[in-house]
Image (cartoon, rainbow, N blue to C red):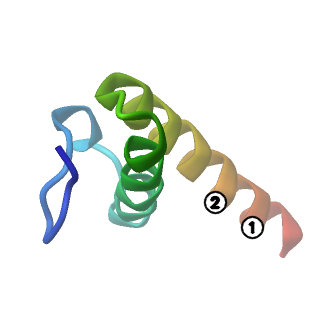
Amino acid sequence: MPWYNGTYPPSYKNQPKKIRDKAVEIANEVLKTTGNEGEAIATGLKQARLHFKKHSEEK
């Protein structure tokens, strides 16, 4: 099930908004390619954290 308009997996609930939004974006793309919701959720969160960690280190 893709996540849109502020809906997101329960495991994203306590994440900061910027990480949650990026994770949802990534998870939706993974879901399109794999069809595996569990993989999409885990990958989305992991990659979103890496994305913001990388960008904070560049500053």
Q: Amino acid at mark 2?
A: Phe
Name the image quarter holding the C terminus: bottom right
57 horizontally vs 15: left or right: right
Name the image quarter holding the N terminus: top left
54 horizontally vs 11: left or right: right
Image mark count: 2
Instruction: Look at 43% across and 26% down and name the residue there.
Output: 39
Say if mark 1 contacts mark 2, CB within 8 Å: yes
Instruction: Look at 22% across and 51% down and name the residue there.
Output: 2
According to the picture, the residue beneath numbered tag 1 turns out to be 55
According to the picture, the residue beneath numbered tag 2 turns out to be 52
Few, some or many residues within 10 Å of mark 2 (<14, 14–19, 20+): some
Q: Amino acid at mark 1?
A: His
Coordinates of residue 23 in the picture (x, y in percent): 43, 52
Mark 1 element type: helix
Depth order, front residue of 3/17: 3
Coordinates of residue 55 in the picture (x, y in percent): 74, 67
Instruction: Look at 34% across and 47% down and name the residue there.
Output: 15
Depth order, front residue of 37/41: 37
